[in-house]
Image (cartoon, rainbow, N blue to C red):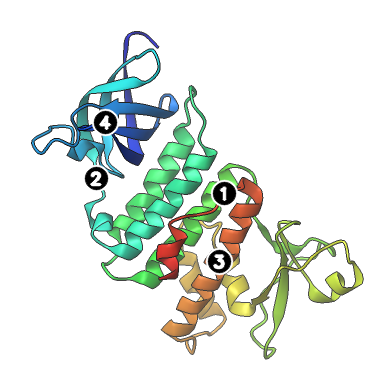
Amino acid sequence: MSGTYKATGINLKAIPIGENDRLVTILTREYGLIRAIVPGARKPNSSLGGRSALFVVNNLLIAKGRSIDKITQAETVITYKKSIGDLGKLAASQYLAEIVLAQALSDRSQEELYQLLLLHLGRLNDLDQGDNTGSIALLCQGIFHLLALDGIAPQVNDCCLTKQSIDPNFSILNWQMGFSIESGSTVELAAASEDPSVMVNHRLTALDLLLFQHLSDPSLEKLDLAIDKFSLEAISDVELAAGWRRLERILRQYIHYYLNIQIRSAVLIDM
């Protein structure tokens, strides 16, 4: 990069620095993760103040510095205002940002990661205000897609021991399937009881498994068709919400194990 360079990026983290400035961590299309000073961003009349806020996408002109770069111009391209004003959507957006910060690299283009994050932030932003169950559902799918991009998404269609495909069984009362975080896969409980090398960390209900298996879909529309297929009209909104919350907690532990991070914004999800 020369003395000045251009980039398009989304603000993922911002902290105050000095009396009036802000230090922003940005995921850019062209250079991956960068950190840059936004001079005067905290002044009341600063033209860069709003442009340095979280989840704002800007076209940037950046001056190369000795130790840290400085943003000299910013033109806003996208904002996610509906998410900022909704605690559930904001928490889910921050959650995804924390994962991306752990995945992103510097000094190299990460177009796919950038586009995937914007896709899921956009879906959260477009969700109806106050739809907390919808926020958790979209969060779970966003987590799964980000893990898949890294090649570490859970495998939930086959048993890791028997190698047989698994379908959720709603005809048997209290039917369950195991899930092993260390193996990154579902596991039949009977097979796991005979093989102590595989630890079962969680037991999945038929509903849990159904939700889990549809996270790899491009969207969650096929899940509605699957619910119709299994004639699950009797599942209440409360049960569905509880299923998504169980799945998020499993994925949270999975993230900690594979990415070695604690999701701070999960506190807001638990609220």
Q: Secondary structure at mark 2?
A: loop
Q: Residues within 10 Å of mark 4 (few under 14, many from 20)?
A: few
- Tell which tag, 3 or 2, sits nearer the viewer: 3
Q: Is residue 58 above or below residue 175?
A: above
The amino acid sitting under disc 2 is Thr
Question: Residue 178 got which mark?
Answer: none
The amino acid sitting under disc 3 is Arg
- Tell which tag, 2 or 1, sits nearer the viewer: 1
The image quadrant where one finds the C terminus is bottom left
The amino acid sitting under disc 4 is Gly
Residue 13: x %, y % from top left: 36, 41
197 left or right of 40 in image: right
Q: Is residue 79 above or below residue 232?
A: above
Q: Residues within 10 Å of mark 3 (few under 14, many from 20)?
A: some
Mark 3 or mark 4: name the one nearer the start of the chain.
4
Q: Secondary structure at mark 4?
A: loop
Residue labelled with disc 3: 249
Q: Where is residue 192, by image quadrant?
A: bottom right
Q: Is residue 97 above or below residue 208?
A: above
Residue labelled with disc 1: 261
- Tell which tag, 3 or 1, sits nearer the viewer: 1
Residue at the limit of the structure toward the left, as seen here: 45
The amino acid sitting under disc 1 is Ile
Marks 3 and 2 close (CB-CB < 8 Å) = no
Residue labelled with disc 4: 18
Residue 58: x %, y % from top left: 26, 33
Q: Nearer the viewer, residue 167 or 123?
A: 123
Determine the residue positioned at 53% across, 65% down: 248
Mark 3 or mark 2: name the one nearer the start of the chain.
2
